[in-house]
Amino acid sequence: MSAAIISVVKKIAIYILSDKEKRGKFLVIVGSIIAGVLGLMFLPVAVLSSMGNMEIEQPQIDKSLFNESAIMASMDSEQQAKIDEIQTAGQEIEIKMSEKNIREQTIKAQLIYFSYFESSPITDFEVYTNLFATAASDEILLDSIKANYGIEIPYEDFMRSYTLVMNSTINEYMFSDSTIKNCADLAAWAENAYISGWGYMNGFIGERNESDRIRYCDNAGLMLGYLNYDPTKKVFGSDYDTLVYTEQGGLDTMPEVAGVGLFDETNHGIYIGNGEVIYCSETVGYVTKDLVSNGNWTSWCTYESVNYSQEVQDKIDEIQNVEEESSDEKEDDVE
């Protein structure tokens, strides 16, 4: 199945399920595709429930529908044209977001467009995607959309829908380099877990709990999840079951690099820049974000198997040189 069709399945769910006549037939198709390809069988239900409190029965999965031709054959010409329209718009949004170096917000831009712009379709997405590039917060973004397009989107409703959608999948657009585990993507992974509303559950590393269909991790699991996740295959492996880390120095020596770890003698967090840290808290019960200064963090650390920038390595070398010089001075004093 092509990536374009996989992508459009998530977006067309809202269109399909909003029509009672189409709902019964196409909920089965959409549910089958998502369950078989993305593991997102309940994504349409979650989105619609959050947006309209609709009561929808779970679809019965027909595995014979796991192919593109079966999907298209089940639709009439009007519905196929609608899919083409949605697919084209979704691809255009993805291209524009990539050009603006904000790929991680692609799902957000697509979700807003396909949820709220049905009666006001866009042919040129330059202005639309630029709103995402310039908005300092989601509140400002929604205000900008209202100012430019006259579409009012309640912040609470949007965040409820967005969180549910993000929790249902792993954002493929957040990775800057899926070929190597690196600190920039570790920071993006932590931010994605926070935005997606991952809960705390001992022994989890980002998988969904099938009983409530929510993603969970524990404190070390936030980092282990990144190490074990394969962005290409979109599955969690099991190569890493223990978080191996090295404390490098006190916070006064920490480089301003997103993706380095923070440690408080018990818990780990991921520094994401701008003085902020994300960590999974057993006490709070979910992945949370806070200012580093508000916590009890005592040191910064690096994690085994994560590639760090030259700036981090330079800082490590600097700390080691200072420690060696201090050690030499103490030996001289003893002599």
Image (cartoon, rainbow, N blue to C red):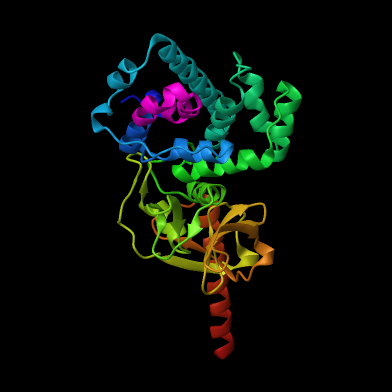
In this view, the residue in front, 174 or 259, is: 174
Q: Tell me the quadrant of the picture where the N terminus can be found.
A: top left
Residue sticking out furthest to the bottom: 334
Span of residues in magenta = 7-29
Q: Is residue 19 magenta?
A: yes
The structure residue drawn at horizontal position 57% and vertical position 28%, both measured from the top left corner, is 115
Residue 331 versus residue 88 in the image, above or below = below
In this view, the residue in front, 325 or 14, is: 14
The structure residue drawn at horizontal position 23% and vertical position 29%, both measured from the top left corner, is 64
Q: Tell me the quadrant of the picture where the C terminus can be found.
A: bottom right
Res 269 seen here: no
Residue 59 versus residue 16 in the image, above or below = below
Residue sticking out furthest to the right: 147
Residue 199: percent from the left, percent from the top? 50, 57
Residue 113: percent from the left, percent from the top? 58, 26
Residue 204: image quadrant is bottom left
Image side of residue 69 versus residue 113, left or right: left
Residue 111: image quadrant is top right
The rendered magenta stretch, by its main secondary structure, is classed as helix
Please tell me how many numbered marks the rendered image carries.
0
Residue sticking out furthest to the top: 77
Residue 257 versus residue 133 in the image, above or below = below
Residue 277: percent from the left, percent from the top? 60, 58
Res 202 seen here: yes
The structure residue drawn at horizontal position 52% and vertical position 67%, both measured from the top left corner, is 282
Image side of residue 115 versus residue 203, left or right: right
Residue 247 versus residue 191 in the image, above or below = below
Residue 150: percent from the left, percent from the top? 73, 23
In this view, the residue in front, 264 or 65, is: 65
In this view, the residue in front, 19 or 121, is: 19
Residue 299: image quadrant is bottom right
